[in-house]
Image (spheres, rainbow, N blue to C red):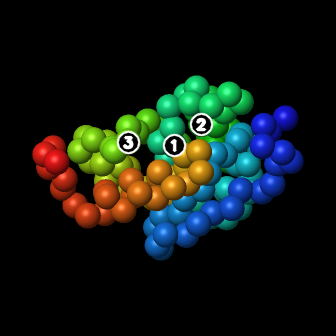
Amino acid sequence: MWPFGPRRRPRFRRIDDRFSATGQIRPEDLPAVAEAGFRVLVCIRRDGEDRGQPQFAAIAAEARRHGLTARHLPSSVPPTPGQLAALRRILAEADGPVLGWCRSGARVRAMYALACRGPVSGRA
């Protein structure tokens, strides 16, 4: 059972024409994700961040069954320049709308905003 009460359909927060964000998704959410038109999924959570969190491999396997591409980009806070560059590459190679997720959706929205700013130096 989902640890936060009854499961609901995932809610997607549209950021722009190519990117939306959401909180944690589960394998059983993938039909709704595909139906919403997403083509690429990006998980920025490390496996095991929370008890009950599905492993990325389980989500990726179910994503493939629905014709979706899933990418795992575990991110630190704040994300490193390398992590931002990796997200930029994923976005550049995406063949359609991208859905990013983390626990609540806030971290992936912030990472996307930083990635859209362009190259980021390693200095504070």
Work out whether residue 112 can be spotted: yes
Residue 77's label in the rendered image is 3
Where, by quadrant of the figure, is residue 119 drawn?
Answer: bottom left
Q: Disc 1 vs disc 2: which is toward the camera?
A: 1
**Is the residue 42 above or below the residue 57 in the image?**
below
| Quarter of image, res 39 | bottom right
Q: Secondary structure at mark 1?
A: strand
Q: Residues within 10 Å of mark 1 (few under 14, many from 20)?
A: many
Question: What residue is rendered at 59% in x and 51% in y?
Answer: 104
Horizontal relation, residue 67 to residue 19: left or right: right
Query: Residue pushed farthest bottom?
Result: 17
The residue that mark 1 highlights is 43
3D distance between C-alphas at marks 3 and 1:
14 Å
Task: Mark 2: give few (<14), some (14-19) or many (20+) Cα within 10 Å.
Answer: many
N-term-proximal mark, 2 vs 3: 2
Q: Are marks 1 and 2 in contact (CB under 8 Å)?
A: no
Sequence-wise, the earlier of marks 1 and 2 is: 1
Identify the amino acid type marked 2: Ala
Q: Residue 20, relative to residue 6: is it above or below?
A: below
For badge 1, the amino acid type reads Cys
**Percent coordinates x, y for residue 89 in the rendering:** 31, 50
Q: Which mark is residue 60?
A: 2
Image height check: is 1 above or below 17? above
Q: Position of residue 61 (x, y in %)?
A: 63, 34
Which numbered disc, 3 or 1, marks the residue closer to the eye? 3
